[in-house]
Image (cartoon, grey):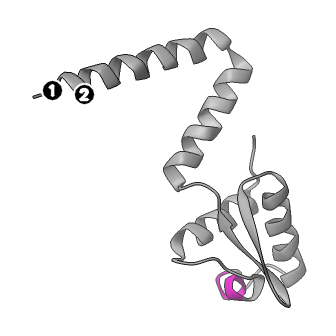
Amino acid sequence: MQLGPLERRVLEALWRRPTAARVRDLQPAFPDIAYTTLMTTLDRLYRKGVLERIVERPAFSYRPRLSRAETAWSFLLHDVGIADEATLSELERLVRARRRALKERP
């Protein structure tokens, strides 16, 4: 899955926050972006499955579904899986081997 530059900026802003955020909470970090554009970007990230949406009347608030590291892994696995199933299988083998090595450490 690809994210556009604004989508990445919004996701980074959400990762920096300790709690979910509404559009108005994020707006000060995006003075160059219209409120409605920011709202559309949050909705797009929600539809892509990247964000959770929480109903808080009168507006929604959003938070990332995954941490920064989990998201990176998710995107990597998605992209590798599409490009090359053999590479994905090799990554899976390497992860299993690493887990075995960690269990064997004193």
Is mark 2 in CB contact (under 8 Å) with mark 1?
A: yes
Splitting the image into 4 quarters, where does residue 80 fall?
A: top right
Residue 96 appears left or right of 87: left
Q: Quadrant of residue 51?
A: bottom right
The disc label shown at residue 25, or none: none
**Secondary structure beneath label 2:** helix
Q: Position of residue 7 (x, y in %)?
A: 74, 60
Task: Give the number of the disc on residue 105.
Answer: 1
Name the amino acid type tagged 2. Answer: Leu
> Alpha carbon of mark 2 to alpha carbon of mark 1: how far?
5 Å
Q: Write the residue at 85% across / 82% down.
A: 34
| Residue 16 placement (x, y as % from top left) | 52, 72
**Position of the N terminus by quadrant:** top right
- Magenta span: predominant SS is helix
In this image, 43 relative to 24: left or right?
A: right
Q: Quadrant of residue 83?
A: top right
**Residue occupying the point 61% across, 39% down:** 74
Label 2: how many Cα within 10 Å (few below 14, some 14–19, many 20+):
few
**Highlighted range, magenta:** 25-29
In percent of the image, x 57 and y 78: which residue is there? 19
Name the amino acid type tagged 1.
Answer: Arg
Q: Residue at x 75, y 43 (%)?
A: 2
Mark drawn on residue 102: 2
Q: Say left or right for 40 vs 13.
A: right
Helix, strand or loop under label 1: loop
- Magenta stretch contains residue 91: no
Is 26 a magenta residue? yes
Callout 1: few (<14), some (14-19), or many (20+) C-alpha neighbours within 10 Å? few
